[in-house]
Amino acid sequence: RVLQQFCSYCVPAVTSAHARELFNSLLAAHAGADRVTDALQARNRALVHLAADAAADLAEALNLDADLNASLAVSSSLARRCGALHAKLTELREVRERQAAANSEMAAAALEKSNARACAVQRRTAAQRQADKARLASWDSERE
């Protein structure tokens, strides 16, 4: 009615059917604008959720990158330590081989010295036996 009165005031020839048609057109346009507004708001909410998800993914990626950098630092440190341990083990192995060689030489020298002593003892014992036999033989010959 308000629209009809307004239209009647402005354009006296406007009928109530024209006013109703104009009003219905305005209502339809308003409803269409509401639908467009609702669709835009829904799209904005979806974009906000996507932006939040992207921000969370970025934060997780940054954390993973930091974790990866820390892991690389630890791996590098472990590699250096392993290299140092390998060098130390190689050095210890060489020392052990030198000690084993020296021990073998000392054992061979000790065995040779022991054999020489045993041979000297056997020679002295053999000489002593020979001397004892000779004395026994001379006593036996003196007795006869």
Image (spheres, grey):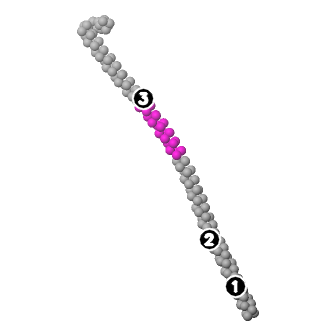
Q: Is residue 124 above or below residue 25?
A: below
Question: Sequence order check: which comes first, mark 3 or mark 2?
Answer: 3
SS class of the residue under badge 3?
helix
Amino acid type at mark 2: Ser
Question: Where is residue 50 drawn, in percent x and y?
Answer: 41, 31
Q: Nearer the viewer, residue 41 or 4?
A: 41
Question: Where is residue 102 drawn, in percent x and y?
Answer: 64, 69
Q: Nearer the viewer, residue 64 or 17?
A: 64
The structure residue drawn at horizontal position 25% and vertical position 7%, both measured from the top left corner, is: 16
Q: Which mark is residue 104?
A: 2
- Mark 1 against mark 3, which lies toward the viewer? 1
Q: Is residue 16 above or below residue 93?
A: above
- Res 61 seen here: yes
For the residues marked 1 and 3, what is the alpha-carbon distance in whole angstroms? 117 Å
Query: Left or right of 15: which side holds 112?
Result: right
Q: Residues within 10 Å of mark 3 (few under 14, many from 20)?
A: few
Q: Is residue 78 above or below residue 58?
A: below
- In this figure, which residue is indicated by the disc labeled 1? 129
The structure residue drawn at horizontal position 65% and vertical position 71%, both measured from the top left corner, is: 106
Question: Sequence order check: which comes first, mark 2 or mark 1?
Answer: 2
- In this figure, which residue is indicated by the disc labeled 3? 48
The structure residue drawn at horizontal position 67% and vertical position 81%, both measured from the top left corner, is: 122
Residue stretch rendered in magenta on the structure: 48-71
Question: Sequence order check: which comes first, mark 1 or mark 3?
Answer: 3
Q: Is residue 16 magenta?
A: no
Amino acid type at mark 3: Val
For the residues marked 2 and 1, what is the alpha-carbon distance in whole angstroms? 36 Å
